[in-house]
Amino acid sequence: MQYISPHTRWHQRLADLLNEHPEIDKLVMGLPNNWQADIFWQNGPRIHHEKN
């Protein structure tokens, strides 16, 4: 997604949405109890370019 839209903030928007709705069971969604501590949710996705 970062490749197509480098300035996307979807990860932050999703985190905000989940925080606004604490009744949503994050474990059922596959998120661990400490999901917000993961670097992905703090900094967003990163692009990994392969060098040939």
Image (cartoon, rainbow, N blue to C red):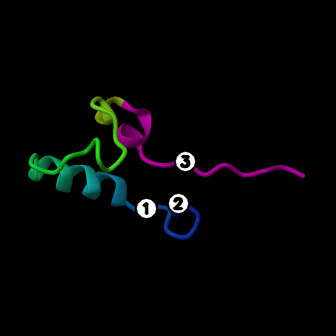
Task: Name the side, left or right, on which 37 lies relative to 52.
Answer: left
Query: Horizontal and vertical percent for residue 11?
Result: 35, 54
**Amino acid at circle 3:** Arg
Judged from the image, the secondary structure of the residue bearing numbered disc 1 is loop
Residue at the disc numbered 1 = 7
Distance Cα–Cα, label 3 vs label 1: 11 Å
22 or 2, nearer to the observer: 22
Which residue is rendered at x = 10% and y = 52% of the image?
Answer: 20
- Magenta part of the chain: 38-52
Mark 2, residues whose alpha carbon is within 10 Å: few (<14), some, or many (≥20)? Answer: some
Q: Amino acid at mark 1?
A: His
Q: Is tag 3's residue or tag 2's residue first in the polypeptide sequence?
A: 2
Q: Are marks 3 and 2 in contact (CB under 8 Å)?
A: yes
Q: Which residue is disc 3 drawn over?
A: 46
The relative height of residue 37 versus residue 12 in the rendered view (above or below) is: above
- Please identify the dominant SS of the magenta region: loop
Residue 2: assigned label? 2
Left or right: 49, with 46 as reference point:
right
